[in-house]
Image (cartoon, coloured by chain):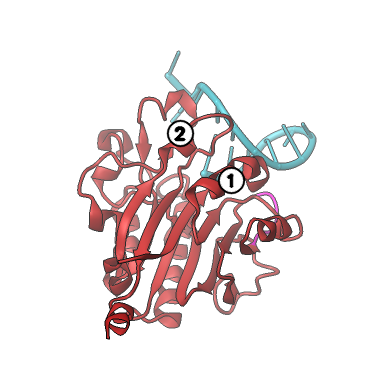
Amino acid sequence: MTVVLRIATWNVNSLAARMERLEEWLRYAEPDVLCLQETKMSDQAFPAARFADLGYQAVHHGNGRWNGVAILARSGVTDVARAFSGENPDTVAECRIIAATCQGVRIISVYAPNGRSVGSEHYEAKLQWLARLHDEIASTCDPRQPLAVCGDFNIAPDDRDVWDPLQFTGSTHVTEPERRALGRLLDWGLVDVLRSHYDTGGIFTWWDYRGGGFHRHHGMRIDLVLATRALAARSTFVLVDRNARKGPRPSDHAPMLVDIEEAPDAVSTELR
DNA sequence: ATGGTAGCGCTGCTA
């Protein structure tokens, strides 16, 4: 079986600050599709021409200082959708979702709100955003078709996904309403691809910059690739690239990548 | 011990 698609996702915590690291990473990780979050950039400043030089068609949805999401694809992209259906992408207050079709796979890059503190208006807005994400997927996608929803969900799916559950008592990212919101996406027909390969705890994608969090392995798994069942079944390899969290000026998130092998029907066609 | 660090951009907000 041949790998036909390498999908990656990375919250870069400012694309301008991370561009050098990102170019280095593209050269050695060689993703076919890369979803970015927290570009903290406007569409005008987005270096689409630079990405084209590197072999990727790139589309971006951002309005400046906060948030900002993008999709890069070697194959090119079609059917690009910025923002949720019914929103004017040029006037939305927060740019947290962009979708495109790449090599026949629908790709959605998401950056869920942080929520700040349980019970705050920001927490309620986070839950509403997650519900809207569910409705967007349910109304525009088909669980029988290849779809990958990739990004920073700002939710640790269960207690294996935080370094010490006791430390998170009463905190965002681990509450039942947040986990239920994620569960609704899975119930619709999505699979947490990393969990389809690994059961162990302590696989993290984010570590606080403060207090030596990375070196103490005080982290969380909040960056996810959710794929429809048939697509997830074609995943052969999942990796959180912790090396990208080391060295000069790292993001506080590590990139994650998923390799997809060719579809069974393509194989049978070949053998016929 | 409501700390600590990074990014943006210039004051304090966001994470």
- The answer to which quarter of the image holds residue A86 is bottom right
Question: Where does residue A105 sit, x and y in percent of width and height?
Answer: 44, 74
Query: For residue A62: magenta?
Result: yes
Which residue is the site of mark 1?
A: A22
Q: Which residues are magenta?
A: A61-65
Closer to the eye: label 2 or 1: 1
Residue lying farthest to the left in this orientation: A199
Q: In front here: A202 or A232?
A: A232
Badge 2 marks a residue whose secondary structure is loop
Counting residues from the N terminus, which is met first, the one under dot 2 or under dot 1?
1
Residue found at x 64% / y 63%: A60
Chain to which the residue tagged by mark 1 belongs: A
Residue found at x 44% / y 36%: A243
Residue found at x 40% / y 47%: A118
- When the figure is inspected, residue A59 is found, relative to residue A16, above or below; the finding is below
Three-letter amino acid code of the residue under disc 1? Leu
Question: Where does residue A213 sit, x and y in percent of width and height?
Answer: 42, 28
Tag on residue A208? 2
Q: In front here: A73 or A182?
A: A73
Chain to which the residue tagged by mark 2 belongs: A
Question: Where does residue A114 sit, x and y in percent of width and height?
Answer: 48, 49
Question: Can you tell which chain is drawn cyan?
Answer: B
